[in-house]
Amino acid sequence: MRFPKLFSVQLVTVTLGIFAAAGPMLLFDAWLKKQGEDEAAVMGAWVIAAAERQVGQTAALLQELSARGVDTCKPAHLEAMRQLVLVSGPIKEVTLVGPAGQAMCTDAGVLSGRRDIVASTATAFPDIMLDVIRVSDLGDRFLRVRRVGPPGKPSVAALLPAMALLPQASLQSGHVLGYARLVLSDGTVVGSTGTSSDADFGLTEMNLSPVRSTLFGISVAISIGNNGVIAGYEDLRRISMVVTGVVALFILGFAFFFLRRHRDTPVADIAKALLRGEFVPYYQPVVDILTGKLLGAEVLVRWRRRDGTTVEPGAFIPLMETSGLVIELTRLLMRRALKDMSDAMSRRPNLTLAFNVAPQHFNDALILNDVGSIFDGTPIKLKQIVLELTERYEVESMTATHRTVAALQGLGCKVAIDDVGTGHSGLSYILKLGVDIIKIDKIFVEAIGTEGHAKAIIETMVDLARNMRMEIIAEGVETFDQVVYLREHGIRAAQGYAFAPALPASAFLELLNAMDPLVDAETSQQPALAGPLVEASAAA
């Protein structure tokens, strides 16, 4: 079969055009990959240095603990181990290890699950060993830093989550990694993080080109997603801020013009109120019911209309959640809270500020950009920020939300599950998302004096929080009897009308200055919320 001459010319022209266009694209792609490889080498060195520093600090803390003679499961020694966990930050658990490597007890007392040794390796320090441990009740691998004691004697060890050694998203380094993996010298994987996996990248230990620590024999392997390209965080932030701003303006503009044709709709009033800045933050204090100290505040919202009337959240929050305007509301509250609280919180580094965040804000990982762009480099540190995800609404992708939670924790923020016990998801949020704090809903607190089931649920939550190293906060506390019950059953942190309602910024700052004067804040050495806010039950 012969093709017409004109068709043949067209075919050749199209083919040559494709090759002509592909050449520059291939060259540009090769350049991008080279940039990614160079970036990965730099990031690998940074990551291994950070991991090396964390392991070294943990080893030094264990050395101090061993020097104090901690080598039994006696109450005094357990208390010393518990104090180390409270002040250390990343350490998940301190364990007393027998001569054969078996776990004897932990800082919580008895063991809550099996600790299986996957692999062990020596380090440049003769008295420090590294073990990869699988903890049955947590379902994850941990790096165990173990100080080897005299022959036949127990030794102390500390569990470090892999997430504490691998970057999720780093504001300081200015990069977001595609994939990172931490391994021992024998190739045993401690943990990995990122947007993909070995199978997705087609990677082996050889072509990952790991960067190795000469002190501890651990190495980190770095690879980059998106054709080997890493964008600088500042670039990403500028781009995302512009895109976010354009999208927000588009949504609000569309809502504004649409609502001009539907002036009487409630969503129209809400959109116009957002544009006018009528939504203001209110601050509900969170109090340590053992000491009476102020631990922080949850940021709530009130709609203060131009005519002076105030609208409660129940009248507009559901509409904002269904219309998508709640994300813009969260950003507004963060900016206003930064303006209100910068001075007070910069001089009280242990004070925390909690924001409610809608599930869609987590699902799309928008919250990472918003927290970074609003709070990074400001007087309010990221470690003072708590982000509350409510259990009342379903999370679309548990995996994506877990990654976002881990990334936020990598930045230093804490993540809480709000309204625990009232949602349809049961305990799945707590078990799968790896949060730091659970908040007992007020319906259980209100029923303390009238329903036995409420007490059983609260006590179960306390045990769960203690075993999973989480903090616990009781909401809706209104009576002295409730305070006494919560305190007797191991709960330290609470909020509600028994202490104070949600307050405007000026009133909250007055309360803060009265409860925690700056002179006391500057000289105090006792950290608040440094560890799980769950004490041993008085009945234990």
Image: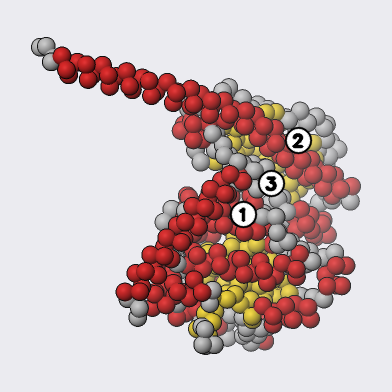
Identify the disc placed on residue 129: 2
Can you tell which quarter of the image residue 43 is in? top right
Can you tell which quarter of the image residue 345 is in? bottom right
For the residues bearing labels 3 and 1, Cβ distance under 8 angstroms: no
Label 2 sits on a secondary structure element that is: strand
Which callout, 2 or 3, points to the residue nearer the camera? 3
Amino acid tagged 1: Gly
Gap between marks 2 and 3, in whole Å? 30 Å
Mark 1 sits on what residue? 372
In front of the other: 64 or 102: 64
Which callout, 1 or 2, points to the residue nearer the camera? 1
Residue under the image location 76 percent in, 75 percent down? 293
The percent coordinates of residue 111 (x first, y second) are 66, 53
In the rendered image, the vertical position of residue 320 relative to residue 6, given as above or below:
below
* Lower position in the chain sequence, tag 2 or tag 3: 2
The percent coordinates of residue 389 (x first, y second) are 53, 63
Residue under the image location 76 percent in, 28 percent down? 214
Badge 2 density bin: few <14, some 14–19, many ≥20, Cα 10 Å: some
Residue under the image location 55 percent in, 64 percent down? 331
Gap between marks 3 and 1, in whole Å? 10 Å
Identify the disc placed on residue 439: none
Amino acid tagged 3: Gln
For the residues bearing labels 2 and 3, Cβ distance under 8 angstroms: no
Mark 3 sits on what residue? 172
In front of the other: 320 or 413: 320
